[in-house]
Image (cartoon, coloured by chain):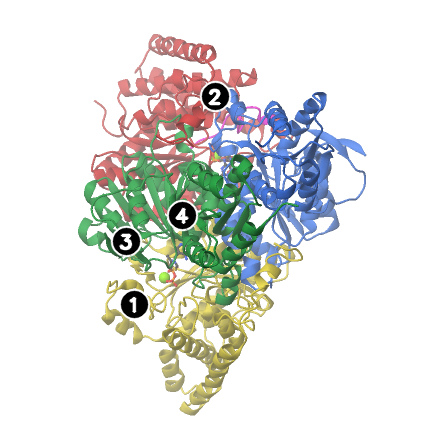
Chain colours: A red, B yellow, C green, D blue
Amino acid sequence: MANQHNPSNEQLLALYERMLLIRRMEERLRADAAAGKLPGAVHLYIGQEAIAAGVCAQLRGSDWITSTHRGHGHFLGKGGDPKAMMAEIWGKRTGICKGMGGSMHVADLSKGILGANGIVGGGLAIAVGAAFGAMLAGDGKVAVAFFGDGAANQGVFMECLNVSTLWKLPIIFVCEHNQFCEFTPSATVTAGQIADRARAFKIPCAVVDGNDVAEVWAAAGDAVERARAGGGASYIEAQTYRIQGHLEAEALFLAGGKYREEREIDEWRKRDPLERLRERLLSSGAASEEALNAVDLRVAPIVEGSARFAEESEPADPELALQVMFSGQRP
Amino acid sequence: MANQHNPSNEQLLALYERMLLIRRMEERLRADAAAGKLPGAVHLYIGQEAIAAGVCAQLRGSDWITSTHRGHGHFLGKGGDPKAMMAEIWGKRTGICKGMGGSMHVADLSKGILGANGIVGGGLAIAVGAAFGAMLAGDGKVAVAFFGDGAANQGVFMECLNVSTLWKLPIIFVCEHNQFCEFTPSATVTAGQIADRARAFKIPCAVVDGNDVAEVWAAAGDAVERARAGGGASYIEAQTYRIQGHLEAEALFLAGGKYREEREIDEWRKRDPLERLRERLLSSGAASEEALNAVDLRVAPIVEGSARFAEESEPADPELALQVMFSGQRP
Amino acid sequence: MARKRYIQAVNEALFEEMERDPKVIVFGEDVELAIFGDTRGLLERFGRNRIRNTPICEATLAGMAVGAAAAGFRVVLHMMFSNFIYTGFDAIANQMAKLRLMTGGQIELPITILAGYGGGRANAAQHSDTPHPLLMNLGGVNVLVPATPADAKGLLKEAIRGHNPTFFLEASGRGGDSGEVPDGEYTVPFGKAAVARAGRDVTIVAIGSMLKPALAAAEKLHAAGIQAEVIDPRTLVPLDEQAILASVGKTGRAIIVDEARDRCSAASHIAAVVADKAFAALRAPVKRITVPNVAMPYAPNAEMHVFPSDDQIARVATELVRFRTQ
Amino acid sequence: MARKRYIQAVNEALFEEMERDPKVIVFGEDVELAIFGDTRGLLERFGRNRIRNTPICEATLAGMAVGAAAAGFRVVLHMMFSNFIYTGFDAIANQMAKLRLMTGGQIELPITILAGYGGGRANAAQHSDTPHPLLMNLGGVNVLVPATPADAKGLLKEAIRGHNPTFFLEASGRGGDSGEVPDGEYTVPFGKAAVARAGRDVTIVAIGSMLKPALAAAEKLHAAGIQAEVIDPRTLVPLDEQAILASVGKTGRAIIVDEARDRCSAASHIAAVVADKAFAALRAPVKRITVPNVAMPYAPNAEMHVFPSDDQIARVATELVRFRTQ
Ligand SMILES: Cc1ncc(C[n+]2csc(CCOP(=O)(O)OP(=O)(O)O)c2C)c(N)n1
Ligand SMILES: Cc1ncc(C[n+]2csc(CCOP(=O)(O)OP(=O)(O)O)c2C)c(N)n1
Ligand SMILES: [Mg+2]
Ligand SMILES: [Mg+2]
């Protein structure tokens, strides 16, 4: 068995499979977006898969997460159903939110997924509230707030650090530092180190290579253990890079404008978290080519099946908004 | 002449006079509030005079300040007219805001006083905006945001630290740590040290005895010099204690409830900033008893005159709200 | 029945619901010592796991309410003055009011938010707003404006037991007003207006704090031979349109009195509903008596000046009764 | 005159006003690269002291607008999507909208806030709100909803030169719509509605994005022998009541079409004004066609379902023309 800081080969292989699922789903969405098949904007998680996978692997099904506008990876990482997610993004009634939420709002309450969020920073306080609930209930649950480096400039971040520290809440703040806020390089809008903002509250901080799933996994393991043991909040900063545009169809928005160099993207492509994990598995002998190919073969039909399911499903029920707006009441 | 870190005797005497003016004005308001003469709630500054006086003594008339619900001291410290302030608090048309603002909104734009503020944390971003304006205009002005320890838990504080650091704005954040947020002891709602939140941005921090005007004055001198020289933001935390209730008539609100010990108040009364300054002036020979009594004699008629002026003034123009709501337009 | 103060009725509702359901929790700034008096005694009875003071950070408090409700609690969030709702507005408008729809109905958010509203106490512009119009427009939250101690108690209990985010707005400084409160257990349902006074000549819809001047006006009108019917909607979302329309159907005349600023007020909305659905019955213009579109001034005389008064209501009602189309 | 896209008209207004007055500054998230296209080219021309990207922190941005305006600048703050107005709502509702009143008129706040509003692009609930009702109720801010490129340019220039906080709301995703824009220098005054189409049978007041379906409906009605007059208020604060009342005075029938949620919408308010001041002229109920009180669903068909359509407008107009009181 692995200890807390070194995932076992089995665990690594499971992480690989989860990351690959996220990657392939995102690639499929990229293609479908380019083909004009998806109604709304999609923000893809390609290149950041190690973070969702690594953190969520340390969680239980009943633990809580809140996510961002770039939320497909967290949804899948936490065990959300690929078909239901895909159908949601297609705006279909079989979608996890019955087509009411779309890409930016995929949520599955039954799996503790409190939802992707279209408001930058919007998930932070919700996670703190869930952690507060867990503390009061004494049910041993942990809450994770995934958020971007851009969200770290929203004041609600500091407010949440304060409350979480004061009340020793079982929460983990996972900042995915992917270097950009839309078309703005993070360095131009972020003073100092984000981790220092958490350190100001004496919250244990881990700044890790977000493209190394083992590092993320280990840091998350520490943090989850601390949270469950009543040790309060943790902060993890996973340094990574946004490989895709801010959203698909970014080029249309930019109209020739430029905010980063192609070369930089290429540099980061070399640090692809999936490739790195693949090489590690192979070189350490933890998995054979065949074993990895078998993963591919398991993932491909899920993706294909999800896309087909989504495409073939009925459009959303147009009356539904009026029915679900309130519980047990008309709007 | 004094250097930046030691006020001259003259300067100390001027500080004494300003602090005494604030104290006597507040005492008068306390009496008038107790007598039921003031229409709205008043939050008094008694015990914190050294902070407004010390900081404002380093400012020019054209520099900007924003203040809090506890704003009379800042208004007077920055050179606001006592009569116009008193009349405002009485709700009279001769008030500095013509009776439209009251105690929580005393403002004098001509003196750079952007206003007291009824929203906890509300003045922070306004000061940052003014500092941004000063930077763009290159007019050498500095902005000071006075705020309480309670306000330091509002996320806007962190946002303002970030923007100010990024853009090297000529701003000084002055946190008056008076140990309470209304009836809540600050320690129970504030994790860690507030100054560490500013340190996370590498903003120069000074944590000073807020009841020692010379210390406040020196720290403010450094900060103002830095701001004018293009060195960016500073943070000053002045540790002090709220001697009065959160607001006059606090006892009514509390209805017998209790959130602090009388003994603690008495302890802090011994550190009264005015008394300390008085003793320092006397013991150092900087001022004689007569000189200090002369200050009393100068201040008393101002206070008395202000109160009389306020009491005798006409009530506000009831039509005014409709006239001033917009500039050049009816509401 | 016993005469009780409004604040006492609110306090009783909190007590009873916290006794009844251990999932009810209360948090907010200064709730432990009860700055408004409505949470008095709860700490001693229920301890800090059920009621606790928070830092000043409304944005987070509103977001936490969502998370704690999602985690299975019935949240009561005290936001003190209505203006601080704006400070937490992101989580209210973008999360609380939308999360259920966005999840396709997966989630219930039993959240009750308390806040004082309105002017009349020289609290000045930043402590005197009447925010029900904004909240009504959000679409995802219930809005209660109980005007009597009995309704305050019954509606608050209903809100706490409910399934949706609900704003419980108390007229600031009216905590001392008293009225008869039923003994024993009861709740007041949402969406049922009360006929505070019956009459046949003109309908006065009085929202929240405006019930008092409306009833005073009705008394004066009575002396002048005009029988005004005073309707207290009690809840604005959901709104009891039927009760209002039935009354206007009878009287043919409607005045809506609202302490909100006029533009896009509840008065506007109710007037619009009347002009649509009771048109055939209308015998006179539909009148709104509201606060003009200004921030609340501080000086008491200036505040009074922008406030609806019983005289003004009586005057407008008299005009309506006399109205004849040419 | 030349045909221009809406976004181009906005861009020209910004360019011209920044050229004209060095005190005009622009800031907001991603304004340098112009995510909506409206600020394109400004950085190259004016540099980072006149236009700059900010961190994501709407609460502070709105507060900074107040401070920078107080310090003598004419501030243009770009808030991207209207929902982010809620994130900065404290500084908007408690400071920007009130500071002038609270200081007794000492201060002018020449602030223009740009934001996209409304649905129709599957942006889902958190990117599709139509917030003009909330802003109208605040009382201290102007609210512009220009529907054509010409009005967009003229009103934006007027806003930037103005003296009061003003929200300039652009229908999201309509930047590509084009129309005739006058050559040379011009502004469009606040508070002057446009008669987008003249008619005598029914008045359709179409707010912002609703002008298009309203005009389409008018065309259909024309084919059916009904002459609809379409009024575009262009600015909601100030509101040109006279133009609306004059039209209803002529037609005796009013429909207000608004993309906002129904309750306390601009449609409610305008309906209330009509029911009050044009009562004598009214020959039929005053109708609102609005979005129901829900958050915007994501799926395009569900979105369409809650949206006012030209068919719906034409149908309601036809009913009104046929309306007879019993
Ligand atoms: C409150 C708010 N402001 C602005 C936006 C627009 N917006 C969407 S994503 C984004 C950048 C977010 O950057 P970051 O948090 O680093 O996440 P990333 O996109 O890099 O994953 C912005 C500004 C928003 N959705 N919400
Ligand atoms: C946004 C907001 N929330 C809550 C309040 C109510 N309130 C007024 S003063 C205060 C305490 C402020 O504490 P602090 O900032 O330390 O200032 P102090 O009163 O100690 O000077 C509170 C909670 C408010 N005015 N504004
Ligand atoms: Mg980022
Ligand atoms: Mg304090």
Q: Which residues are magenta?
A: A239-251
Q: Which residue is mark 3?
A: C180
x, y (%) of residue C70? 32, 34
Q: Secondary structure at mark 2?
A: loop
Give the spatial CA distance, label 3 vs label 4. 19 Å
Q: Which residue is mark 4?
A: C198
Does residue B40 show up magenta in the picture?
no
- At x 28%, y 71%, the residue is B265
State the residue lying farthest toward the bottom: B290
Q: Answer yes or no: are tags 4 and 1 on the same subunit.
A: no
x, y (%) of residue A254? 62, 30
Label 1: chain letter:
B
Of D70 and B217, which appears nearest the observer?
Answer: D70
Comparing marks 2 and 1, which lies closer to the viewer?
2
Q: Classify 10 Å Cα crowding around label 4: few (below 14), some (14-19), many (20 and above).
A: some
Q: Secondary structure at mark 1?
A: helix
> Which numbered tag is attached to residue B251?
1
Q: Is residue C101 above or below residue C147?
A: above
- At x 30%, y 40%, the residue is C158
x, y (%) of residue A242? 49, 29
Amino acid tagged 4: Ala
Label 3: chain letter:
C
Amino acid tagged 3: Glu
- At x 60%, y 51%, the residue is D165
In the image: residue D30, left or right of residue B35? right
